[in-house]
Image (spheres, grey):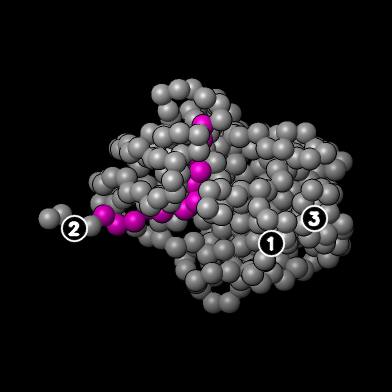
Amino acid sequence: MLRLRPRLAAWAPPIALGALTVALIAAVIVTRHGRGLLVRAPVPQVIARKVSGVPTPRVPSQKASFDAEVIYGAGLTNVAPSPVAALKTQLGDEWRELGRAVGRLLVRPSGTRSQYFEIGMVAVAPQGSARLEILTSTNQKGITPVNAGASQVISFGPFLASKHGRTGIALKSVQPHDAKVGARLLLSPLQAEYLAPGEPVMRMPALAELGPNGLRGMNIPNGVTARLQIAPGISGRCMVTLKAAGIGGTLRVTAAVGNETHSVLVGSRPAVIHIGPFLHPSSVLSLSASSRGAYASTRLFLSNVRLVAAPPRA
């Protein structure tokens, strides 16, 4: 795994964990067929986002709605209480043990049916470090480390959805440095959502943060670059559309699609903002926020983001 420096990291605000220590959010962007890129931050062809010390989401205290249809099968039949007390409200108290056997499940994502979907969970390695490997019935895979004693938010995608019915998922714990069976893992209830064309893989909705005007999303601190994996389906000239606000002051937000970059100013009130146009879409969208004053508390709150087709030239 390649570690990014803070200015190249995606979304690294410290988050209060109550009795837990303050932690940095991290993300692992995993390719469909191999290893990936470790990014300090919350968030983003397959992504696995991890968090040392799972953050308590800044959302109203109520259990998140898990609308995806998930059927747990062999290897995931043992139910365990939540190992993270701070997350019982958001993720419930019925986690799954992943041991030596491959864990199998069927999932039908929530939302409007589309060609791609993302899947998110929290993983805990209570006894030793391991890697969590995922393989879908559409023949896509990803792998991400899970450090001993750490609670980590993980999101995989975009994955191809099965054309008919549910998509099969196989989960396996493997050793940190080889393919042998790894340490036992505890997995939270899964969230899976369909991704529209041009939509990014984000952190699991149950752990979204609360922003201005009751919006839910995540923060990009001043001076940090977030790399988001984008679901295919957009072609030709395109725009980046954001619903965002600057927290602590006006920010300059720069979007990079391929080798092109464009910037706009984002004020303190939530607004829909368009950046571009860009000549060609890309599987990765990079977003960075900056202000004239290097204030640690200044950040971009991102509620929604999408790559969309640009309007025809006049």
- Please report whichever mark, 1 or 2, sits nearer to the chain's N-terminal start: 1
Label 3: state its secondary structure. Answer: helix
Taking the spot 77% from the left edge, 57% from the top edge, the residue there is 89
Q: CA distance from mark 3 to mark 2?
A: 49 Å
According to the picture, the residue beneath numbered tag 2 turns out to be 312
User: For residue 302: magenta?
Assistant: yes
Membership of 54 in magenta stretch: no
Q: Which residue is mark 3?
A: 88
The residue beneath circle 1 is: 64
Label 3 with label 2: CB-CB less than 8 Å: no
Locate the N terminus by quadrant: top right
Query: Which residues make up the magenta segment?
Result: 298-310
Amino acid type at circle 1 is Ala
Gap in Å between the C-alphas at discs 3 and 1?
10 Å
Q: Nearer the viewer, mark 1 or mark 2?
A: 1
Seen from the viewer's position, the closer of residues 145 and 188 is 188
Assign a secondary structure to mark 2.
loop
Residue 100 percent location from the top left of the image: 83, 53
Using the numbered discs, state the Cα–Cα distance from disc 1 to disc 2 in whole angstroms.
Answer: 40 Å
Residue shown at the point (37%, 60%) measured from the top left: 233
**Which callout, 3 or 2, points to the residue nearer the camera?**
3
Dominant secondary-structure state across the stretch colored magenta: strand
Residue 311: x and y, percent?
23, 57
Above or below: residue 290 compared with residue 137 = above
The residue lying at 67 percent from left, 66 percent from top is: 66
The residue type indicated by label 2 comes to: Pro
Question: Which residue is more in the foreground, 133 or 93?
Answer: 93
The disc, 3 or 2, on the residue closer to the chain's N-terminal end is 3
Q: Residue 205 location, x and y as percent?
A: 61, 56
201 is higher (above) or lower (below) than 164? above
Q: Residue 240 location, x and y as percent?
A: 35, 49
Crowd band around label 3 with a 10 angstrom C-alpha radius: few (<14), some (14–19), many (20+) = some
